[in-house]
Amino acid sequence: MAKKRPTPKRRSPARRATPKRRGPRSASERVAGLLVLLPWLMKRKRVRLADVAKQFRMSEEDLVADIQMAAVCGVPPYTPDTLIDVFIDDGWVVAEVPNFFTRPLRLTSAEMYAVIAMVRAAQKLPGAPERSVLARAVSKLAKLAPEATDGPVHIDLPDEPNLEDLRSAQADSAELRIEYFNPARSEVAQRTIRVVRIFSESGHWYVLADDDKSGAIRNFRVDRIQSVVRTGKLYNQADVASRIEDDADGGWFGSDLELVTLRVRGDATWIAEAYPTVSRRKNRDGSIDVALRVSSEHWLSRLLLRGGRNVQVLEPAKYSDLAARTAALVRARYA
Amino acid sequence: MALGALTTLSTPVAKKSPKTPSRPATQKTQPRVNAAERMLNLLALLSARTQPITLKQIRAELHNQYSDDNNAARAQFERDKSDLRALGIPIEGTVLGGAQAGETAYSVNRNSYELSDMGFTAEELQALQLAASIVHLGAQEGEQALWKLGAERVNPKIGPRASIGFTDPHLDTILDAISVRSPLTFMYKGEHRTVDTYGMLARRGFWYIVGFDHLRKAQRVFRVDRIESAVKKGKSGSYTIPKNLNIASAVPTDRQMMAAGDYEHASAQVRIDPSLVRTVAREFGDTAKVRDEADGSAVFEIPCSNGYGFRLWLFAMVDKAEVVSPPEVRDMVVRWLDELTEQA
């Protein structure tokens, strides 16, 4: 029967996902993949096809095509006993007799640096595996590349004293009362939250939580949480998690937020890099026109004040004097 | 194509018939598939042989997998060889003497490309998996390494998780250059730079490289996303990395930037409104606090040598902070504000 050519599938547009390919995979990509996949399978002997595809971020079609190809490779005379022992059996990938390609490829220096940097950064976070166990694993890795352990690659995550309380509350499904500084209003308010997820993005820690005040699932920046106490109530993780699905379209910033276009230049060009932008265009004179969504007028006024004379509001016109108004407000303190 | 059809087709018995000289016609239309299969067979053959073998012998063994035409077969073989090399599998060539004088025989040493048994315990492997799930470094390097070590990607729901972007096209070249001590050349702020790269740092969503800049003849920091050209590697083994160099402290933090400048005043006293006292105390430490005021606000001593950094920090609090002294710094803040008010 005719084999179908692997169909390139578009990945979901996750913000951090690396687009691995656009067209059909090249021969060497397929071989490279198999040389990692085969030893991994031989160590496990039987794994569900769907799990393998998920683990290796491949489509099931591509995976099946690769395994079928490997199954007819080996050494002369290419009789069943001289072919790679791998096959698909009723939704399972089976590799019971390790005969060829039983050992994985060596780690590249980039991979070695990556693993060691990851482990080092993870060690500092709450919830990390036991130090002594990780240290043993790292010392075994270090034998492969002694120079990598000096750590030429570092991952610097902000130190957050609140992380441990948030993690343990999440683990216990314990509702929290927090004092939170809201830059959209420059005020501190009490909120009651139920933690869904704790993550870092662009160098800040965030907690995604169900917030009783707004009645929505939203992100709080951990360094703006001034205090954390348990209310004594427990919550159901599954309930809260299912609400995220409903809210998923809201995304990082809801699309109902106001769109503002700024022209930034000189020492204010950091604005074009620091926030998620809707569009960005470089002008001939070196200035950048950047469109971004703003959560409140106060937040925008703060941004304009920080950017100073090198930021100009292009749209909407109602904000063209916002920087001046804000400066006047702050100036009043210096009267 | 439905998956069910594929899975039933691929039972081992059905597929594992001896190869016949004529390959299935469907594969002729898929040269890429052929090349992948041929590469695997070539690697399997060379790995299984204890003695080097010539291309002639390889072609005879891999019956019909290489072209019948000598030149075309040679070209195919060279391509396979260089593709395999790129995957970290060097195929060695030895020129023969005697009856086969002038011919090259090829071999591959499994020990040179296979990972030796790491001897991880199940517990250690799990610890690595968990660590990698807490700090996730791009798709390519981190995951590939885990799979090679026999571990897998796991997805814990509880606890902090950091995803470090690793998508910049220069990162692979840079890592590779660091590992072989090869200087990098690239355009940066409109100038050609040659940098002996000592290390890389991910901080606040950006990647930085630290190294010796030949142009400035000093150690410098570069932000990777600001590199304006392709990154090229120079000669391997051209430099050594200084002992005891701490990459993390070589890249100044925001706070250090505020203290690094040539402004005549090193610090200023700033009154902070009650709502932000705790935040500022955490940022600069309790020792930075000069006094508490009766209304709950507090005065802090904050570095301001770098006027620009100081301004960004101060104005982030809008009207919740006020410089009280020295008068020169207070006047400077007033000038900044007046410039903005006049702009309207």
Image (cartoon, coloured by chain):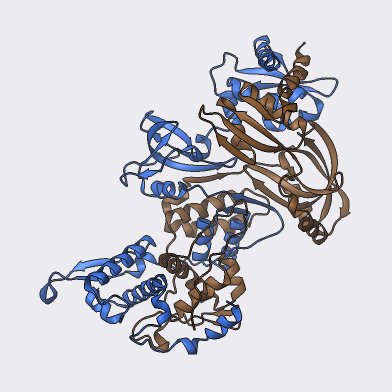
Residue A245 picture location, percent across and down = 76, 58
Image quadrant where one finds the C terminus of chain B = top right
Residue B99 picture location, percent across and down = 11, 77
Q: Specify the chain shown as brown.
A: A
A196 vs A334: above or below: below
Residue A46 picture location, percent across and down = 57, 79
Q: What residue is at 76 percent from the left and 43 percent from the top?
A: A256
Q: Chain B, which colour?
A: blue
Q: Is residue B262 visible?
A: yes
In which quarter of the view is residue B335 placed? top right
Residue B330 in the figure: left or right of residue B226? right
Q: Is residue B278 visible?
A: no
Residue A76 picture location, percent across and down = 34, 84
Residue B316 in the figure: left or right of residue B20? right
Q: Nearer the viewer, residue A15 or A138?
A: A15
B57 vs B219: above or below: below
Q: How many marks?
A: 0
A282 vs A205: above or below: above
Image quadrant where one finds the N terminus of chain B = bottom right
In which quarter of the view is residue A84 placed? bottom left
Q: Nearer the viewer, residue B268 or A272?
A: A272
Q: What residue is at 30 percent from the left and 82 percent from the top?
A: B63
